[in-house]
Amino acid sequence: MQVKVCDLQNKVIGIYFSANWHPPCRKFTQVLSDVYAQLKNRNAGFEVVFVSSDEDVHAFDAYRACMPWPAIPFSDLETRKELNRSFGIEGIPALIIIQPNNNRENDEDAVVYNGVEVIYRHGMEAFPFTKERLEELHKEERKKHEKQTLKDLITHRHRDFVLGHSILQEQVPVDSLSGKTVGLYFSAKWCHPEQKFTPKLISVYQKIKQETGNNGGGFEVVFVSSDRDQKTFDAYFGTMPWLALPFDDPKNKELTKYFDITGIPSLVILGPDGKTVTKLGRNLINLYEEKAYPFTRGRVELLEKKMDEEAKSLPKSEFHVGHRHELSLVSEGTGGGAFICCDCDEQGYGWAYLCLRCGYEVHPKCVKTIMESNKT
């Protein structure tokens, strides 16, 4: 069915750049379809136009069949290329949201470039996707975070407990976590990175528990699952020494949205008062292990200073067994900063050994030095 361009006038338009071959696109298409249906039911004046990056017309037709909105014809390659160029599309999925009859003085205020993030974060509540509406939602979020408590976050009127880590998964009252630093661990058995991070977190968790004591104050972790079924959840949770929300509990999805979790595994740290300390718990565990506890800004600053002092004694360059070129020691101010370690695949920050020729980068602790006689 053909849709006339004039039929799109006076509507908020989402230009959706996507492709059938890319799993994140297929996942977001389902989310966007739900929001689209809800807005259509309200006659909200919202339309989506699909701009395909599929490899051939057969893939386009198959993907298009699961979409309730119109599309730029696959044969119209020039228009698809021009739209990608005009909006600077560098990755998919991407959703550009444009206000109707754009005649504002500042055109940028009438275009939302991060539509995927907005939909994931706010859903239909973000409509009509104006700058004013998004600012209003951000203010509401800030107020919620300022007032949050652990009990409000992880319980509801039908459940005031979390699951224990024994075989019987006994009910542990959430009140027993009062006054503790709590890590909300967003993960799933199917997630490949968890295979490295979960064992590391278990080790760090046990060391922190030993240092702080198992009772009273201290540290606890609550697993927030993205597993696909109860059996997988039970098997995965069975490997963990901490607590969990029930598999089918609505709080799993609510917390994922509330903390804007876009990738797993992820570790959000809550302080003894229930307020968010950091959403970068995974990074801090990778960098500092148990020394990161209690994950506060003051603690991190102290560790950063210590790292700077230790870096003074590190060699200015190294040859690493995993790379053929010489690696140079760099800091945040000399080419360092945030990076993904090419040896352990985890994020690093600050000091690193970097190949100035090809960009290969590793944590200083991950360097396995090649003896001088073996260098080529």
Image (cartoon, helix red, strand yellow):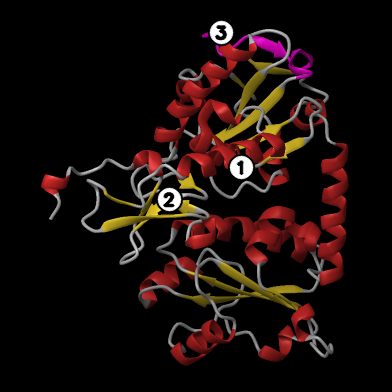
In what element is the residue under mark 3? loop
* Quadrant of residue 223 within the rendered picture: top right
| Amino acid bearing label 3 | Leu
**Vertical order, 141 against 180 (above or below):** below
Q: How far across and down, in percent of the image, does residue 228 sit? A: 50, 36
| Amino acid bearing label 1 | Leu
Q: Residue at x 56, y 61 (%)?
A: 29
Are circles 3 and 2 on residues that touch, CB within 8 Å?
no
Q: Which mark is residue 280?
A: 1
| Amino acid bearing label 2 | Ala
Q: Residues within 10 Å of mark 1 (few under 14, many from 20)?
A: few
Question: Label 3: which residue?
Answer: 168
In the rendered structure, the answer to whether residue 196 lies left or right of residue 370 reads right
Q: How far across and down, in percent of the image, does residue 205 sit? A: 54, 21
Question: Label 2: which residue?
Answer: 352
Measured Cα–Cα span from mark 2 to mark 1: 19 Å
Q: Residues within 10 Å of mark 3 (few under 14, many from 20)?
A: few
Measured Cα–Cα span from mark 3 to mark 2: 45 Å
